[in-house]
Amino acid sequence: MSNTAITYTQYHDERQLASIMDLIDTELSEPYINMTYRYFVHTWPQLTFLAHDHTTAQSQSQSLAQNSALAVGVVVCKQERHKSGLMRGYIAMLSVRTDYRKRGIATKLVRMAIDAMISGGAEEIVLETEVDNSTSIAFYKRLGFMAEKRLYRFYMNGKDAFRLCLPVVEGEDKYG
Ligand SMILES: CC(C)(COP(=O)(O)OP(=O)(O)OC[C@H]1O[C@@H](n2cnc3c(N)ncnc32)[C@H](O)[C@@H]1OP(=O)(O)O)[C@@H](O)C(=O)NCCC(=O)NCCS
């Protein structure tokens, strides 16, 4: 498999929802219901991005290829003004299929999301991750995120979370 067949697109229609839910439900411990996904992708469609692998579809016709491309990664975000007064971008969900990891797919997805949130006026970007998810913590720290606080028993499975934050400083390289 080569990375050249991976494409990145913004969320554009409800037919993508099943792939998004499948990618996230298999990887994240928190059980999300349909309404939660819809809340994010319908309110902020410009802040959800998907990665597809077209490798297996290359020999097929154009229209078939579009339909049969495999969804291999997703990032789902939102953006709102926080009570602090800052416009806050929030990365709610991020997942890459196990067999597609360590190839820069999550990096590309998160960078697209960060750029879109900054274009929409974000002054900081935050997320939570389980305190023992060392892969996720290493991944986000490499992008310039810093641990802000520990949230006790944040998840339904009883685990604590770290809130990670990326301050957006105008004119600075936002990726650390
Ligand atoms: C976290 C996750 C999204 C990373 O996806 P990915 O596509 O493999 O990430 P990338 O290839 O862009 O990784 C870039 C960098 O992140 C870090 N990283 C990624 N996976 C890592 C691992 N297993 N251990 C340590 N660092 C890791 C590395 O610095 C890596 O750079 P390198 O490839 O030059 O070493 C993926 O592992 C995943 O889906 N995990 C399950 C769901 C999850 O934990 N989501 C985040 C919590 S909300």
Image (cartoon, helix red, strand yellow):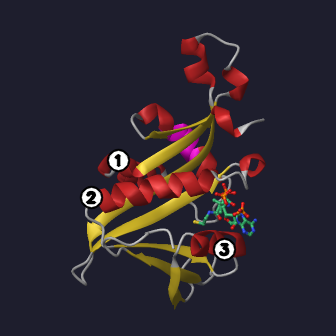
Secondary structure found at label 3: helix
Quadrant in which the N terminus appears = top right
Q: Which residues are magenta?
A: 17-21
Query: Does the residue at mark 3 contact the one at mark 1 (Cβ under 8 Å)?
Result: no
Query: Does the residue at mark 2 contact the one at mark 1 (Cβ under 8 Å)?
Result: yes
- Which kind of residue does numbered mark 2 sit on? Gly
Secondary structure found at label 1: helix
Query: In the image, is residue 76 above or below residue 7?
Result: below
Residue under pointer 2? 120
Q: Quadrant of ligand 1?
A: bottom right
Q: Position of residue 85 (x, y in %)?
A: 21, 80
Residue under pointer 1? 46
Residue under pointer 3? 138
Q: Is residue 18 magenta?
A: yes
Q: Is residue 77 visible?
A: no
Q: Residues within 10 Å of mark 3 (few under 14, many from 20)?
A: few
**Does the Cβ of the disc 3 residue fall within 8 Å of ligand 1?**
yes
- Tell which of 43 and 137 is nearer to you: 137
- Could you tell which of marks 3 and 2 lies nearer the N-terminus? 2
Compared across the picture, whether 42 is left or right of 159 comes to: left
Query: Does the residue at mark 3 contact the one at mark 2 (Cβ under 8 Å)?
Result: no
Q: CA separation, marks 3 and 1?
A: 26 Å
Magenta span main SS: helix
Q: Position of residue 105 (x, y in %)?
A: 62, 50
Q: CA separation, marks 2 and 1?
A: 10 Å
Q: Residues within 10 Å of mark 2 (few under 14, many from 20)?
A: some
